[in-house]
Image (tube, grey):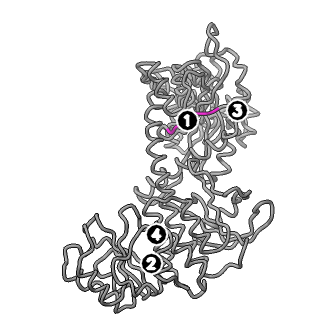
Amino acid sequence: MGVTVRKAMQIGGLLRCKVVAGERGLDRTIDHITVMEVPDVIQWLKGNDLLLTSLYPIKDDREAIGKLVEQLDEVGSSALAIKTHRYVEAIPESIIEAGNRLGLPIIEIDNEVSYLDIMTPLMELMLTSRDADKEPLEPFFQWITELAMSGKGILALIEAVQQMTENIITVGSEIPPLESLYKGRNVAPLTRAQKNELKAAKRSIRMQRLLDGRMTPCIVTPLLLNDELYGDVTCWHTKREFRERDFQVLDRTVLLLALEFLKVITKADVEQTFKDDFLSEVLLGHVADKDEAIKRGEIFGWDLDKNYQVLSIAFAKGAAEGADLEALWVQEQKRRLLRKINEIFRFGVHKIITTIRKDYLVVLYPREDGKSGQEYPYRDDPQKEPVMHMAESVRRQLAQEFEELAFTVGVGRFYPGLEGIHKGFSESVQAIKLGKPISGTSGCVHYEDLGIFRILSQFNDWRELESIYSETVGKLVEYDWSSNANLVATLTEYFANNCSLSETAEKLFVHVNTMKYRLQKIEQLTGCSVHDAEKRLLLHVGLKIHQILQAENI
């Protein structure tokens, strides 16, 4: 059921507008509101339309302007509202004359009145008085499009959909800057199973969810960007039964909400880029002025005058088809990782600092110790055990959320001050790289636990280490490759079993005599006897270098 032009002039923005011609047509009924965006808009009108225009599409076409009112009258339009002082200073006389002659109301829109000031109150009135099942959806879709394009925001879109569906609408968000919009309602978050169901369906589906502590039927529409779930729009059965058209309304509205989410994501990405660039300077030790760096940190809400424990988290990513798809996948995963790591520490006592540095997610966790006069790094860090417990908890939670990824957490030793962040970061990365022989591709490694790897990592000139490797284990690697033997594995297991022939043979499922033969072969190839302490040390070091080289290739 529509509204007459006469009544419309008493509502919303039209109160500040005036009828300049065609007064005898004020009892025409308005069923649709359309904005003239193209010259041939007439063919899209359905009858009983209020046409809003600035005349921009035809401002230079006198013939089109002269015919406009007659064409509108022929298709049964209700009125023509023209915004002046933008593209035309005054309503053309030909339009006023035709309006009076045909009895088609011509309305001059006040310069301070927007199209939405007119559309929103009229649409709300028509939505509450219509026969919902028979009313076409196009006017509603045009209305919410205008709301979105004019920057009215998410709340205005929610209100519009709520008017249309006559039920409560809530919006859930996975993005920290966009808090979930529950309008004072207690809404249970989507479970992981529900999220997976929405991602698979990629459309509105019926669910049962908790609203204010009660299980309530609802329609949930996924808000997807790059196939990742960033939020949901939920219509709750609180007033009337669901209709089939509700699904259409939600599916169309979520596209406009996705644009609002994309604005927030883009802004957050730009801010994160500035954060990452600045923190890279700190992590790499490229800070020229400490006081200036601390001030820059305050811009992002960080207190870099505090002391921090540094954790680096490496994640092994899966394969994707095509370079473009791979880049999108990696960027999306980095966003999700940052969101998740901040969520893990969200309710903690301390405010963490996070950044992405190449393939590492870096966490700076505040520590209260670090007094002057203390020797660093600690010989026996009193916080090492709780820090490692926290690191393992973080790794486990990330692994549960990202089942397709493997995580390794590297923990550096604790150093106070801004310079300590650089030292801690360097050691945390070394812990990951050199600790792979200890932890594999997933686990937690503290730099302090690397043993001899800590010494080997300090060599800037690798030529001497490569020389030791080539003279020892390197020869065994070549022999294994050419002869399909297992001398490197045999030597590794032999040292792991404290040079016990019988235990090593049992572990390798071979005879003791086979072990003796292999050890003799090792001595023959390398010139190093496992019974000579000095030569045995060379073989040990050679194996460690071999493990480092293997870790670099993982």
The secondary structure making up most of the magenta span is strand
Lateral position of residue 301 relative to residue 208, left or right = left
Lateral position of residue 67 relative to residue 375, left or right = left
Question: Which mark is first along the chain, 2 or 1?
Answer: 2
Which x, y percent locates residue 52?
38, 74
Write down the residue under mark 4: 15
Which label sits on residue 349? 3
Which x, y percent locates residue 333?
53, 50
Secondary structure of the residue carrying tag 2 is: strand
Front position among marks 4 and 3: 4
Front position among marks 3 and 2: 2
Could you give the CA–CA distance between mark 4 and mark 3, rounded to whole angstroms? Answer: 54 Å
Could you give the CA–CA distance between mark 4 and mark 1, rounded to whole angstroms? Answer: 58 Å
Question: Which mark is first along the chain, 2 or 3?
Answer: 2
Q: Nearer the viewer, residue 132 or 248?
A: 132
- Do residues under tags 3 and 1 come within 8 Å of each other at their CB atoms? no
Q: Which residues are magenta?
A: 351-356
Q: Residue at x 47, y 61 (%)?
A: 259
Could you give the CA–CA distance between mark 3 and mark 1, rounded to whole angstroms? Answer: 19 Å
Which label sits on residue 362? 1
Write down the residue under mark 2: 33
Three-letter amino acid code at disc 2? Answer: Ile
